[in-house]
Amino acid sequence: MNKEVNVKKVYMIVAHPNRKGLCFAAFENLKRGLEAAGHEIKISDLYQENFNPVLFFDENKLRRDLQHDPEVQVYREAILWADHLVFVFPVWWSGMPAILKGFIDRVFAKGFAYEYDSKSHMKGLIKNKTAWIVNAQDAPGIVRFVPFIIHDYGLVLKRQILMNCGFKKVQCFPIFSVIKSTPERRSQWLQKLYHLGEKL
């Protein structure tokens, strides 16, 4: 291990049901790069863990009390433990998979991830953390520059969620045009992700 590396605690959240596809390979290569650099890692594989994405509250289970939900406490502890979070997922129907959206709904609850001040302005409570968003999608990269196409390649998670919850820096690493990619191109993507992990 390079002695100059500033060892970080990294919490990786992966949301893809196919453990043999490109998205999971992206997760594994990034993880190997982080491990090679000596960083500490915790992992939540949401599909493997059968994470329940359904947010539920009623007159007996109040929404204001969801910050204390014991079913997701382990995930909140991992977030508080980490210096850096990594989200790896595909973009389906222009957004994140439902299981990851449910993870956000249930884990990033008011009182844990954010609060409102006296003027009803949102105030992030998860401070001094950074994050990477890695996703794979079939859409071509040109969609980023077409104004009338609404396409989320991690920006909702970055801007509307993580930044609003107090994260100080969030970077997106989208992989475009997966459906047309060659084995050589995929290998290049995976190598880049490995080196990205090494350089954290």
Image (spheres, rainbow, N blue to C red):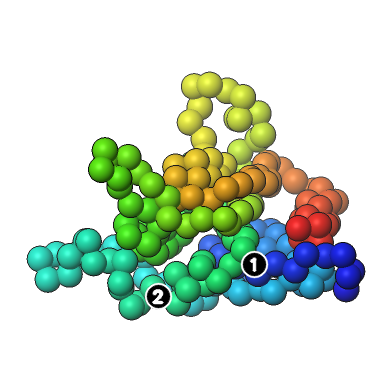
In x, y percent, where is residue 81?
Answer: 55, 71
Q: Residue at x 75, y 68 (%)?
A: 7
In x, y percent, where is residue 39?
Answer: 74, 71
- Left or right of 49 on screen, residue 122: left
Q: Residue at x 89, y 69 (%)?
A: 2
Q: Is residue 67 visible?
A: yes
Q: Residue at x 30, y 72 (%)?
A: 68
Seen in the picture, residue 24 relative to 174 is either above or below; the reply is below
Q: Residues within 10 Å of mark 1 (few under 14, many from 20)?
A: many
Q: Residue at x 50, y 27 (%)?
A: 149
What kind of residue is marked 1?
Val
- Left or right of 115 on screen, residue 25: right
Residue extending farthest front: 118
Q: Earlier in the sequence, mark 2 or mark 1?
A: 1
For label 2, the SS is helix
> Do the residues bearing badges 2 and 1 touch, measured as CB atoms within 8 Å?
no
- Point out which mark residue 73 bears: 2
Q: Nearer the viewer, residue 155 or 162?
A: 162
In x, y percent, where is residue 194?
Answer: 80, 60
Q: Number of numbered discs present? A: 2
Q: Residues within 10 Å of mark 2 (few under 14, many from 20)?
A: few
Q: Is residue 25 visible?
A: no
For label 1, the SS is strand
- Where residue 54 sits, quadrant-wise, is bottom left
In x, y percent, where is residue 131?
Answer: 61, 54
Q: Which residue is mark 1?
A: 10
What kind of residue is marked 2?
Gln
Residue extending farthest right: 2
- Disc 2 versus disc 1: distance between alpha carbons? 17 Å
Residue extending farthest top: 147
- Left or right of 77 on screen, residue 185: right
